[in-house]
Amino acid sequence: MIGNMGQKVSGWLVNIAIAITALRTNLMRSILTTLGVMIGVFAVTLAVAVGSGAQVSVMQSINALGSNMALIFPQPDTGEGGRRSFDRGRLTMRDARAIEKQIGGIDDIAPQLRTNIQLVVAGRNASTNAVGTTPGYGKVSNLVAENGRFISEADVRSAARVVVLGPTVARKLFGDFDPVGETIRINRAPFNVIGVTESKGSSFGNDNDDIALMPISTMRQRFSGDSLAGPDDLQVLFVGFQDGISLPEAKREMTKLLRERYRVRGKDINPFTIRTTEEFMKESAQVTGIFQIVLVAIASISLLVGGIGIMNIMLVSVTERTREIGLRMALGAKRSDIRNQFLVEAAVLCVIGGAMGLILAIAGGTALTVYADFPVPIGVGVSIGAIIFSAVIGLLFGGYPAVRASRLSPIEALRSE
């Protein structure tokens, strides 16, 4: 048993040595042949990595908002064939308080107003997204102040002119200097910087640190203007739930409560829209999955072309080496030996091309990660899979030439010139 296994391993090693010698004999042709496989493996590997990176980036964006959370918008629900009964959406601070009191399992809520603002200090200025909110925003969004403090209930009650800056805004205005305690002007009004949030990084090209937070009462007084229909209206409400709470069930309870508050009847469309992070994750997984399949399908065309090139060159090689095949058969080589020789040669050719394509894909993925701030993970599993896949391509497309070589007649092969 052990002796037979050793003979088989020795035979495969001999075939690999013959394959490498044959490839070196026609070096330029071998290099040009591997280009097709190299480009195909590069395209497929990078497509898989980009699809995985898109999933990672979307999940990072959702996690940056907060986990186990529902988002409520004052936008009429599109419904499922329901009859529209509201021209505009509705969501107020009173709704937020009712949800907090009557829905179980809530960890905290974060009512919000949003707008763009201009910040100025000592000749420097920065434009950013401003969020008027309450202390619950930090808990719901998993956001804390790295320096200084976060917004307090006292700030909200007094409509204090205080602001918490994201790291990107702080760096634009103050460089490496700690801005806590400094005064800046926001749309010409003086504000005291009370804190700088921890860095959330970037996801899907969006800088999560380019933000400024202030009490919701302050924003309502100074920056909302005529953008809100009512003095108590909200633009969005984050509702964070405790671990283990069923988000679909919580969504049903909140929908029922708000429909009762707005006296929505029967099949009338809701004047609000509720989405959960669970829904966002499922939808994003479906979209990025389809995106990845399309990318891989397109990239696979180049791999198919590379495989056809391998088959073509191997057929040429069989024709050129007909006399060599006849000589080996005359010396006692079996048909299986001839077949395995050309199969190994095709597989080695594809593995070399696959390895070169993998190196290019890793270089491309690294460049995208560093310069485009887009995660392109090419792990060990993907790398090993790319090499194995290359070998399989060689065996598949090299199979016909190998079988054709093994079926040659020794006498006719020796007569060939």
Image: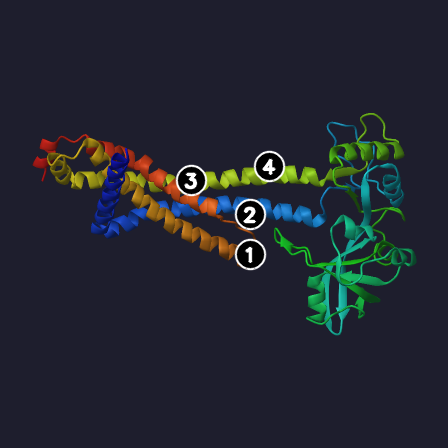
Task: Of the two numbered discs 1 and 3 on the same chain, state the one appearing first in sequence.
Answer: 3
Q: Which mark is in front, 3 or 2?
A: 2
- Reading the image, the residue beneath label 1 is 372
Q: Residues within 10 Å of mark 1 (few under 14, many from 20)?
A: few
Figure colour scheme: rainbow
Residue at 85%, 52% in the rendered image: 226
Say which mark, if any, is on residue 286.
Answer: 4
CB under 8 Å between discs 1 and 3: no
Task: Of the two numbered discs 3 and 2 on the same chain, state the one appearing first in sequence.
Answer: 2
- Reading the image, the residue beneath label 3 is 300
Residue reaching furthest top?
A: 266
Q: CA distance from mark 4 to mark 1?
A: 24 Å
Residue 66, horizontal then vertical, whole percent: 72, 47
CB under 8 Å between discs 3 and 2: no
Task: Of the two numbered discs 2 and 4 on the same chain, state the one appearing first in sequence.
Answer: 2
Residue at 61%, 50% in the rendered image: 204
CB under 8 Å between discs 4 and 1: no
* Three-letter amino acid code of the residue under disc 2: Gly
Q: Where, by quadrant of the figure, is residue 55 drawn?
A: top right
Residue 78 visible in the current orientation? no
Residue reaching furthest front?
A: 2
On the picture, is 411 further left or further right than 190? left
* Three-letter amino acid code of the residue under disc 4: Gln
* Three-letter amino acid code of the residue under disc 1: Ala
Q: CA distance from mark 1 to mark 3?
A: 25 Å
Q: Residues within 10 Å of mark 4 (few under 14, many from 20)?
A: few
Residue at 74%, 54% in the rendered image: 143
Q: Where, by quadrant of the figure, is residue 181 drawn?
A: bottom right
**Image height check: is 176 above or below 339?**
below
Q: CA distance from mark 2 to mark 1?
A: 12 Å
On the picture, is 242 further left or further right than 361? right
